[in-house]
Amino acid sequence: MLDLVIKGGTVLDGTGAPARTADVGIRDGAVVSIGDVDEPARSSLDAGGLMVAPGFVDLHTHYDAQLAWDPSASPSPLHGVTTVLGGNCGFSLAPSGPEHADYLMRLMARVEGMPLAALEKGLAWDWRSFGDWMDRLEGRIGVNAGFLVGHSTLRRVVMGDAASEGAPAGEKDVAAMVAELHAAIESGAMGFSTSQAHTHHDGSGAPVPSRSSDAAEMLALAAAIRDHEGTTLELILPGCLNGFNDDEIELMASLSVAARRPANWNVLAVTSMDPDGWRRQLEASTRAAERGGRVVALTLPYGMSIRLSFLTGTVIDGLPGWGPILGLPVEERLRALSDPEVRRRMAEGAASPEAGVLGYLARWHRLEILETFSPVNDGLEGRRVSDIAKERGQDAFDTLLDIVVADGLRTGLRPPMPQATEEDWRLRAESWRDPRTVVGGSDAGAHLDMMCGAVYSTSLLASVRDHGTVSWEEAVQQLSDVPARLYGLRGRGRLAEGWAADVVLFDPDRVAPGKERTVEDLPGGAWRLYAGAEGVEHVLVNGTAVVKEGVATGAVPGSLLRSGRDTETVLP
């Protein structure tokens, strides 16, 4: 007898094959039949009018911490995601020890936008090995999850404070890092991640530890993962944002060759304002292939928006003279931002030549009020500061700070962003079809004060309906099978007999991301930006519903993915 039969849906199996109307039979957490299923079942699900697809695989998340207090990895399952990969960008929670907890918490809070209070209250921080940390998640998660080992964490554990002092590691330190990496992978880690991004700083403002490494250190660590089945490599370089130089292209190719594994980087921007920019970036992949390596770019299926806040200060604390003010405790900051003299100095700093590209944000009159929290600010959401200032007969900057202070600094603000054109959508679709890319780069679980990246999957599906970007078959393949095959996930990413019953049912007429909003649901009373989904009706993980009629069930059927056991080797 079947546990469940999904009846009469339009099945997209993830391979790109044409959709077909079929039933899907599920037993013991696996798909056992697809077609006209007439075997008795304990329960059934009417999928008439819905599309039935494999669960989506998100390769670039930072759910490492959140899963400790939120086993569902919300809101990703609401968007059809059933498998998440963490430990990206060189940052993992393990291996470490309690003596490194304060440093790692402050690093994660600074570089990945996770509230420090949540990290302090939501995690025990008493593990010492990667295996010890992973064992704490076994049997307690609602999604399938695997994790890379972060370079900055390895360096900190081996070298302590010296990890961030700018000097290359000595031979003994490199050997110790390699040994720690081997031990972590033997415990199930999925591979290795690193960062050289100039935007990555720790809690004290110093470069994160991995930025002090040289090529020899990175190559030694990359070479270590080739000794293990089913491992992979992830990295971020300055050129990921600004365009790769020859040295960076050589480094990426060399790392892939040393590892004998694909390397992926985050994130490829595609825009009609620079229609050939993404093609130039992908030349790195072509040149790596000539060397015998494989380099793949993750690319978001929508134009990223940014949300500013005077509470976190992320991004705007880079304006000249703003850092010390936005670093004050909240009560002191409120007093400072109410002081006319402080306001004058801040406005001058933001308008100075030293502000550089951040000066674009200092066009206060153009900011949109996204979300307010004080009754004094009722009715301001969705309006521009310029219009409010005109009504009040005030300077735009004074108007902005009056609103922010009244909200206790929590006001959500958005600078003007260009609206996507049909040419943008056409170029994005072209990039998705390129074998040198994978749709992803959500950063879900991170940058909680600026965005909710979990919407990437429903954004892609909505683009199929609204802009005709790709076919439904292609969209589902990009969200499921393509990332699963890149990481060698065994039995996941497709609807096929004998494969895991990770399944998403969505309404093609309604599927879309929901409105982003602030929720206070993190440990320590901390808040985050959150967006649900429309039209995602049911989501199964290993045959068990984690979303039913659009609502999370709280079930924890997820598998903790371990390299070798749950993955197979993918060669460049």
Image (cartoon, rainbow, N blue to C red):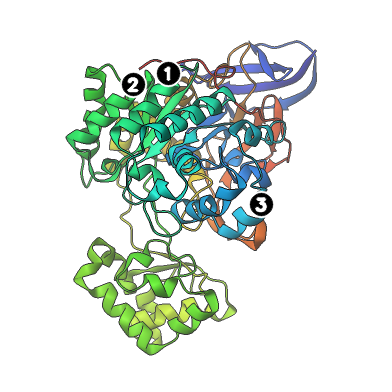
Residue at image position (63%, 42%) is 67
- Using the image as rendered, state which of residue 204 and residue 260 is in the foreground: 204
| Spatial separation of the CA atoms under disc 1 and disc 2 | 8 Å
In this picture, is 21 found above or below 89?
A: above
- Indicate which label's residue lies in the foreground, 3 or 1: 1
Q: Quadrant of residue 171?
A: top left
The residue where tag 1 is placed is 226
Is 381 displayed left or right of 532 in the figure?
left
**Rendered location of residue 128, percent (x, y):** 62, 39
Disc marking residue 258? 2
- Indicate which label's residue lies in the foreground, 3 or 2: 2
The residue where tag 3 is placed is 122
Residue at image position (43%, 79%) is 401
**Quarter containing the C terminus:** top left
Residue at image position (68%, 22%) is 6
Residue at image position (27%, 16%) is 292
**Mark 3 Cα shell of 10 Å, populated few (<14), some (14-19), many (≥20):** some
**Mark 3 is on which residue type?**
Gly
User: The residue tagged with tag 1: helix, strand or loop?
Assistant: loop
Q: Earlier in the sequence, mark 1 or mark 2?
A: 1
- Using the image as rendered, state which of residue 399 and residue 90 is in the foreground: 90
Asked if the residues shown at circle 1 and circle 2 are in contact, with their CB atoms under 8 angstroms apart, the answer is yes
User: The residue tagged with tag 2: helix, strand or loop?
Assistant: helix
Residue 323: tell me if it is visible: yes
| Spatial separation of the CA atoms under disc 3 and disc 2 | 38 Å
In this picture, is 323 found above or below 332?
A: above
Disc marking residue 131? none
Q: Earlier in the sequence, mark 3 or mark 1?
A: 3
**Mark 1 is on which residue type?**
Arg
**Mark 2 Cα shell of 10 Å, populated few (<14), some (14-19), many (≥20):** many
**Rendered location of residue 353, percent (x, y):** 19, 70
Is 568 displayed left or right of 551 in the figure?
left
